[in-house]
Image: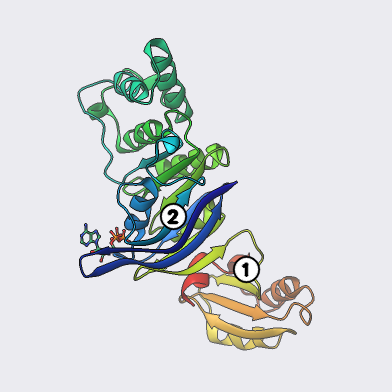
């Protein structure tokens, strides 16, 4: 199903061109990442999508409708980075109130609040006050709020920022569990996390959509990424260069090499590489079929 269509989309704040002629079509499904340096235009794109601001020029539609139109009410939701609940009212009270604002009445509002709190694993904390919750639980409560009314698109801005690794993982699992019934658009600077979670990555830079990487598609050119325990990396690079089909080898950090190869000339390159490491008595930490998202975006 078509999720988003932008053509020639631009947004100007005074002299500042925050979004510059963006053409983009997205379908519903696995989570979509929105990345880019500070000031690249990510928040501007999300605000346009939510109908909070209007384009300066160009067109944008969400599920075929104008952002902000009444037909999208309840279909699109967002968790902003600094979303907070009132510290002095219980989770159930507040979420039931939000459910009423979404059109649920009386008991069905309570039921909806309980449903979304269960989805995020907070059934035991329904009577807790937000001020008594840990940071991770607070984040989950804020996500629960965004899930009220069964939206089809949820925008998450830095959903795991400031969370410890275990809580960050819980949020990732939650997002993965809820996809693809809900399509998530996630703005984040955490590439490793996005790589684990998303099917597609949009890269904005200076307001331009400079790349759209499909993580589920095999790399057009073939790559292997090899991360080693400390060893003589230059000597290893020289050995690897002689494996059949290897076209180029680049460093990606001190102990990581990215091999580009020609699939038609390299048969079972991964096996040959492992045999070479064994012969040389070298220990690897990780062998990845392909390139990391960071290498795809920045090399
Ligand atoms: N209301 C505004 N008035 C003027 N300029 C703005 C306004 N909002 C954003 N900008 C400018 O537009 C550009 C894009 O900002 P935006 O907040 O969309 O970037 P971002 O990618 O979300 O950045 P960050 O990663 O830092 O959150 C920036 O140069 C910013 O200073």
Quadrant of res 177: top right
* Spatial CA span between label 2 and label 1: 34 Å
Task: Indicate which disc residue 25 carries.
Answer: none
Determine which residue is flagged by label 1.
290
Foreground residue among 142 and 130: 142
Mark 2, other Cα within 10 Å: few <14 / some 14–19 / many ≥20: many
Foreground residue among 69 and 182: 69
Instruction: Kindly tell me whether residue 30 is visible in this rendering.
Output: no
> Residue 73, image x and y in percent?
41, 34
Residue drawn at 61 percent across, 85 percent down: 248
> Residue 154, image x and y in percent?
44, 42
Foreground residue among 232 and 42: 42
Instruction: Kindly tell me whether residue 24 is visible in this rendering.
Output: yes
In this rendering, is residue 165 above or below 191? above
The quadrant of the picture showing ligand 1 is bottom left
- Which callout, 2 or 1, points at the residue further toward the start of the chain? 2
275 sits left or right of 159 in the view = right
Q: Secondary structure at mark 1?
A: loop
Foreground residue among 114 and 1: 1
Residue drawn at 23 percent across, 21 percent down: 89
Determine which residue is flagged by label 2.
60
User: How many numbered marks have been drawn onto this rendered protein structure?
Assistant: 2
Mark 1, other Cα within 10 Å: few <14 / some 14–19 / many ≥20: many
83 sits left or right of 263 in the view = left
């Amino acid at each position: 199903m078509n999720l988003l269509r932008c053509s020639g989309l631009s947004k100007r704040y005074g002299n500042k061109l925050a979004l510059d002629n963006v053409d983009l079509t997205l379908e519903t499904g696995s989570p979509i990442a929105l990345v880019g340096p500070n000031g690249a235009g990510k928040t501007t794109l999300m605000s346009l999508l939510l109908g909070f601001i209007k384009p300066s020029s160009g067109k944008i539609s969400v599920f075929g409708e104008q952002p902000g139109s009444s037909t999208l009410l309840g279909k699109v939701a967002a968790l902003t980075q600094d979303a907070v609940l009132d510290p002095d009212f219980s989770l159930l009270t507040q979420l039931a109130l939000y459910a009423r604002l979404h059109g649920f009445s009386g008991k069905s509002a309570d039921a909806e609040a309980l449903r979304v709190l269960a989805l995020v694993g907070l059934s035991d904390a329904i009577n807790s006050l937000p001020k008594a919750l840990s940071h991770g639980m607070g984040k989950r409560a804020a996500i629960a709020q965004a899930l009220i009314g069964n939206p089809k698109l949820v925008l998450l801005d830095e959903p795991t920022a400031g969370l410890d690794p275990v809580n960050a993982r819980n949020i990732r699992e939650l997002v993965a569990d809820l996809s693809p019934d809900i399509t998530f658009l996630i703005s984040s600077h955490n590439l490793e996390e996005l790589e684990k979670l998303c099917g597609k990555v949009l890269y904005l830079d200076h307001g331009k959509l400079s790349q759209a990487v499909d993580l589920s598609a095999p790399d057009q050119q073939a790559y292997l990424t090899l991360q080693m325990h400390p060893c003589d990396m230059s000597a290893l690079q020289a050995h690897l260069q002689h494996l059949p089909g290897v076209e180029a080898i680049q460093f990606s950090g001190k102990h990581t090499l990215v091999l580009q190869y020609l699939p038609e000339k390299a048969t079972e390159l991964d096996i040959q590489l492992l045999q070479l490491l064994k012969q040389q008595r070298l220990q690897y930490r990780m062998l990845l079929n392909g390139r990391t998202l960071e290498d795809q975006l920045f090399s």
